[in-house]
Image: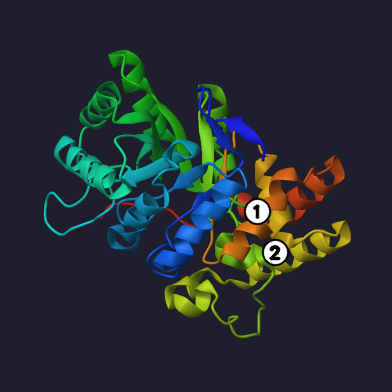
Amino acid sequence: MKFKRLGNSGLQVSALGLGTNAFGKRADEKTSIGIIHTALDQGISFIDTANIYAGTESERIIGLALEGRRQEAVLATKAGLPRAEGPYGSGSSRRHLMLELEGSLRRLKTDYVDLYQIHTFDPHTPLDETLRTLDDMVSSGKVRYIGASNYAAWELMKALGISEARNYMKYTSIQCSYSLADRTPEIELLPLCLDQGLGIIPYFPLAGGILTGKYSVSGAAPAGSRAETDPNFNRFLSRERIELGDEVSRIAAELGTPPTSLSLAWLMHQPVVSTVIVGATRVEQVQQNLPSAALELDKQTLERLDQVSQPFRSGEPFAFYRLP
């Protein structure tokens, strides 16, 4: 497994990470624990979760899986999106973040998290309050590094400026939707991260499975696919994205590699991408994703992929989660 630095920090993360939002939902406890153990055995150290995944079940299951193996993992979680109703159930206030961090630590059965991320920008809380709270968490030893998620470029730059002025711990990374089917971060976010030394952690790296080539314009959704288990996902299945998936599959076939590996490897070749989080609902999927970390793409292949995905540099992001 290849390792990269998370931004300009000293933290080394596996180039391929494990996304866990299916744990406790589309993957039961036993299967999820097997997935985590297989990932660790194969050198995948970065495990990403959040306090809201499967109603906190994801964190609880990860805590069980990491008993006796905590030091093998770089553990990341998040808070900020709605977890409960009412004025204190979401956001990035000191009250909410302190409460949620303690809950995450209990469920994860650990006394610290390697990376604590704000799940989305909170327009109702002063950034100074959020950043001071995160700085206190680092000082307490309960958090090692901090990151953002679903921030617009101007929001992230404002946060970095406040941290610089106040001498707070700075954001080390940013999570965003990024894939061949969503290259919108390249317009503003990626140049910002290059300049400021942040690592990008893409989510939806396979566009929910579209880049695996399993969807067709006229055919029904494959059994067990996200489109079948989550009808809301069908809003992403545009003709243009499905045709992109077909084109990626054709290029992958010429190279003798699965389209999944090609799509993930393309991301790993992009500047400032530190780790690519990929979900799994079966142990076999972890094994299938491993070759992507070793796949080297030549200049011609990168240019072809750039050409076929060029239309997806503009427009709306594939996904962007915000507070109401």
Dot 1 crowding, Cα within 10 Å, few <14, some 14–19, many 20+: many
Q: Position of residue 60 (x, y in %)?
A: 32, 55
Residue drawn at (62%, 34%) of the image: 3
Residue 126's label in the rendered image is none
* Quadrant in which the C terminus is drawn: bottom left
Q: Position of residue 226 (x, y in %)?
A: 51, 72
Residue drawn at (43%, 74%) of the image: 232
Apparent side of residue 298 relative to residue 323 in the rendered image (left or right): right
Residue drawn at (26%, 28%) of the image: 137
Residue drawn at (49%, 53%) of the image: 19
Q: Secondary structure at mark 1?
A: loop
Q: CB under 8 Å between callouts 1 and 2?
A: yes
Foreground pick, 153 / 51:
51
Q: Secondary structure at mark 2?
A: helix
Q: Position of residue 318 (x, y in %)?
A: 51, 57
How far apart are the alpha carbons under marks 1 and 2?
A: 8 Å
The tally of labels here is: 2
Q: Amino acid at mark 2?
A: Leu
- Residue 131 picture quarter: top left
Foreground pick, 97 / 233:
97
- Residue 207 picture quarter: bottom right
- Residue 310, visible in the rendered structure: no
* Quadrant in which the N terminus is drawn: top right
Q: Position of residue 160 (x, y in %)?
A: 38, 24
- Residue 282, visible in the rendered structure: yes
Which colour scheme appears in the figure? rainbow
Q: Amino acid at mark 1?
A: Leu
Q: Earlier in the sequence, mark 1 or mark 2?
A: 1
In the picture of the structure, the residue carrying the numbered disc 2 is: 244
In the picture of the structure, the residue carrying the numbered disc 1 is: 180
